[in-house]
Amino acid sequence: MRLSLQPLDVAAAILLIGLGASLFSTFSLIIACIVSTCERFMGLGQMLTMPIFFASNAIYPVALMPAWLQVVVRANPLTYEVDGLRGLMLLGGASGLRSGLRFLRAGARRTTHDCGRNRDISTMTE
């Protein structure tokens, strides 16, 4: 496979990376709103990051995974980001861009709404 450096593909990849980053940073913000100390936040963040990464198609193809893990992979937002980036940046790569953008946009919208609702960050203690 070869890398695609078409300007529109690169711009769409940057957009997709930004959308994924906003989704995952909002996940972190939600965790920070729930826990009371920095140590708990870091521990919980690491405890969630590794399973999200390994339960995606970033390392292994979904077809090689057991059926129960495939269900988890299909609900994982990182799977859709990886699919979209592979479709954009690899020549001959299968494009999962549309489903990736839809899933990440809906996830970012939902998590931002949930995080912003009834949360007063100024009252959090260190």
Image: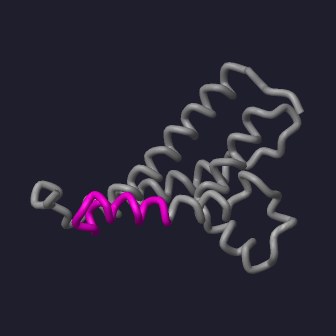
| Left or right: 42 as drawn, with respect to 103 | left
Q: Give the quadrant of the C terminus.
A: bottom left
The extreme left residue here reads 123
> Was residue 43 drawn as part of the magenta stretch in this picture?
yes
Q: Position of residue 6 (x, y in %)?
A: 73, 21
Direction front: furthest residue: 39
Q: Does the segment drawn in magenta span residue 6?
A: no
Magenta stretch, main secondary structure class:
helix
Seen from the viewer's position, the closer of residues 7 and 78 is 78
- Location of residue 19 with respect to 68 vertically, above or below: above
Q: Quadrant of residue 62?
A: bottom right
Identify the residue at image location x=49%, y=59%: 107
Image quadrant assignment for residue 69: bottom right
Q: Residue at the spot x=67%, y=56% of the render? A: 79
User: Is residue 119 toward the left or the right of residue 68 in the image?
Assistant: left
Quarter of the figure with the N terminus: top right
Range shown magenta? 32-47
Q: Residue at x 40, y 63 (%)?
A: 43
The residue at the point 50 percent across, 65 percent down is 48
Q: Is residue 4 above or below residue 43?
A: above
x then y, percent, for residue 74: 68, 67
Quadrant location of residue 50? bottom right
Question: Total of numbered circles in the picture?
Answer: 0
Q: Is residue 111 left or right of residue 77?
A: left
The front one of 52 and 70 is 52
In the drawing, does residue 71 fall left or right of residue 34? right
